[in-house]
Amino acid sequence: MSRIKNITPARIGLAVLLFLLVSEAQPTLLRGQSQTDLAELKKKVGKLLEQTKYTEAAPLLEKIVAAEPDDPDNHYYLAAALLGLAATAKDENARRQINLRARSEFIKAKELGSRQPNIDAMIQMIPADGGTSGSFSSNTDAEKLMSEGEKAFSRGQLDDAFKDYQKALALDPKLYYAALFSGDVKMQQNNLAQAEVWYQRAIQIDPYKETAYRYSATPLMKQEKYDEALARYIEAYITEPYNRFTTAGLVQWARATKNTLAHPNVEIPTDLEFDEKGDAQLTDIDPVVIVYAATRSAWHKEKFRQTFPNASRYRHTLAEEADALRSVIASATAKSSAKTDAADPSLLRLKKLDNEGLLEAYILLARHDAGIRQDHPSYLHANRDKLRRYMTDYVAKGGGN
């Protein structure tokens, strides 16, 4: 999937609509701009962003940034408008230059202390060279229609954009983004029921892309259907848990509902180094660490090759980490009569997760590294329900009991 596709034009979880709230703030005035004039300018820009008229909003946002250069939100919304403007560029070089400017504005917003939950994701998702990659469809006519639809969307010509997306979807029924962007149009038109229809169509086309789950939460948030919105954000997150946009969606829900998101507090030292023979280098004689390290060492030495005979080299796997943590649980259980290890809150939480069938979900979402992350796709396909249950029962409840 193209990296830049998640965000152009202005596919930013519709956060730009919050600009209307920003316009009510009292500005620090520079360059002779009166408070009244600046407030009116912000209101005008807010309306343009609501209408997805990014080509009209961008030059006005330039003026606002010039008047309030230290306001992170101004830079954020300018960057958002520039992404919309990039979709109307006539050639790749012009589009690249606009994307570069947008990226620099997002970076500036972060440097100034932006609290937008997706700020890091926005920076990360724009390539450092400003380029775009990939295409929407291998069908030439569908691809052309998608491009025209994006241009129309950025100009605020929503009906025209919707027609183009629908024509593209007719030519390529598996075109995820045609369905997704059709939902965006209906969302912008405040037709929330139809937005839901098209977001669900996108999910049906590809349930292993996070975007439609996350976008479909926005209409629910607007209607204050927070429980339903959370369910969508969770589906987005478990689909792509290492994507900063999915994390930002959950953070947005938590802020709106004043809830705390947290993984269970399991304090077991597991940061180990291994020598060339596969032996763990221990500096801690804690019995828990010793048991954990012994299991990990066995995987380094022989169990990995036995379990994954076709692998070209060792990597830390979900299976290894689960085995190591279960060895800790078993050791603690065997010593339960001493009323020491068994009473440790971390071990009790770990045992509870294992008893509920959620140990692997916990590892994938809370204790992952580069090796373990490679096991997420296959686990998701077979165990989406467990990932969902872990997020619902633990993370969304501040870590669970």
Image (cartoon, helix red, strand yellow):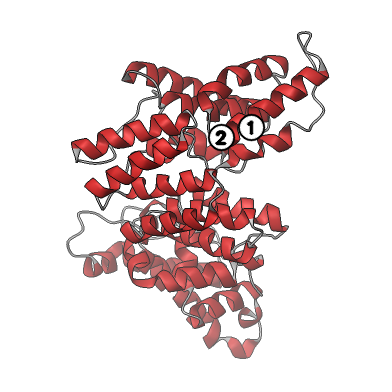
Kindly indicate whether the residue at mark 1 contacts the one at mark 2 (C-beta within 8 angstroms): yes
Residue sticking out furthest to the top: 32
Observer-nearest residue: 314 or 147?
147
Q: Which amino acid does label 1 sit on?
A: Lys
Q: What element carries label 2?
A: loop
Rendered view: 72 above or below 12: above
Residue 125, given in percent of the width and then of the height, sits at 44, 36
At x 33%, y 32%, the residue is: 147
At x 63%, y 62%, the residue is: 225
Q: Mark 2 points at which residue?
A: 51
For this view, does 246 lie left or right of residue 303?
A: right
Quick check: can you spot residue 110?
no
> Which quadrant, please, contains the C terminus?
bottom right
Residue 228, given in percent of the width and then of the height, sits at 58, 65
Q: What element carries label 1?
A: helix
For this view, does 394 lie left or right of residue 365?
A: right
Rendered view: 76 above or below 348: above
Observer-nearest residue: 315 or 186?
186
Q: Name the residue under label 1.
A: 47
Residue 148, given in percent of the width and then of the height, sits at 34, 31
